[in-house]
Each structure stands twice: as structure tokens, then as C-alpha cells.
Image (cartoon, rainbow, N blue to C red):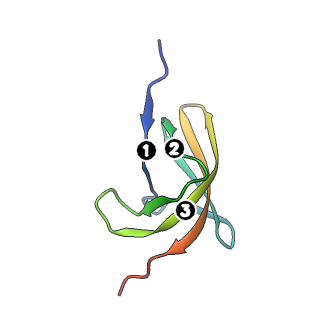
Amino acid sequence: MGMPLELNTMIVTKGREKRVEENLFLLEKEGYRLYPIEIPIDVRKTMDSDSSGTALIKKVEWQKNSTTLTYQLISLNTTN
């Protein structure tokens, strides 16, 4: 039985992110997911929403069928 992996090209928070420091966040996602690390990646609240900013993923941890991301917000898109 292989480990199903999903490749993600953006961070979709669904409002579940937890602030660790001023611009550092933790986000737990269901399942095992691959993310690009240390390159700018889009952050969105939902798949269909506009980008809310850009982040660098610092760490990806896999355990108990979940993926935990530690990411640093490097720019914020303010919506009018």
C-alpha cells in the first residue's frame, strides 16, 4: 500500500492557520502533501479566492495522515 501524495502549488488556509510569530504561521492539512520549500508560493483562503499574499515554506512535517506546514509570510495583498 503506497502513500498517496498530493502536489500543492499554493497554500490554501481555509482560515485554519495559526500565528506562531509576527509573520510565521503553522497550518495543518489532511493527508500527505508535497509543497515547494523556500520559494515564493501563493497563499489563499480558498482554492477560488484571490491571493492573500506570498509565503516561503520553511518546514513540512508528515505524521498521522496529516501535513503540517511552517511558513513565513513575505508579502500581503490587501483587498479593498
- Residue 12 position, x and y percent, is 43, 55
The residue at the far front in this view is 39
Tell me the residue at 56%/54% (across/down). 39
Which numbered disc, 1 or 2, marks the residue that appears first in the sequence? 1
Distance between the alpha carbons at the discs numbered 3 and 2: 12 Å
Q: On residue 35, which mark appears? A: 2
Q: Are marks 1 and 2 in contact (CB under 8 Å)?
A: yes
The residue at the far top in this view is 1
Distance between the alpha carbons at the discs numbered 1 and 3: 13 Å
Tell me the residue at 43%/44% (across/down). 8
Identify which amino acid the numbered label 1 is placed on. Asn
Q: Is residue 47 depicted above or below 1 in this figure? A: below
Tell me the residue at 50%/66% (across/down). 54
- Residue 74 position, x and y percent, is 58, 69
Q: Secondary structure at mark 2?
A: loop
- Residue 69 position, x and y percent, is 59, 49
Identify which amino acid the numbered label 3 is placed on. Ala
Q: Which residue is mark 3?
A: 55
The quarter of the picture where residue 48 lies is: bottom left
From the viewer's side, name the closer residue of 27 and 38. 38
Distance between the alpha carbons at the discs numbered 1 and 2: 5 Å
Q: On residue 8, which mark appears? A: 1
Identify which amino acid the numbered label 2 is placed on. Tyr
Which numbered disc, 1 or 3, marks the residue that appears first in the sequence? 1
Q: Are marks 1 and 3 in contact (CB under 8 Å)?
A: no
From the viewer's side, name the closer residue of 39 and 35. 39
Q: Callout 2: few (<14), some (14-19), or many (20+) C-alpha neighbours within 10 Å?
A: some
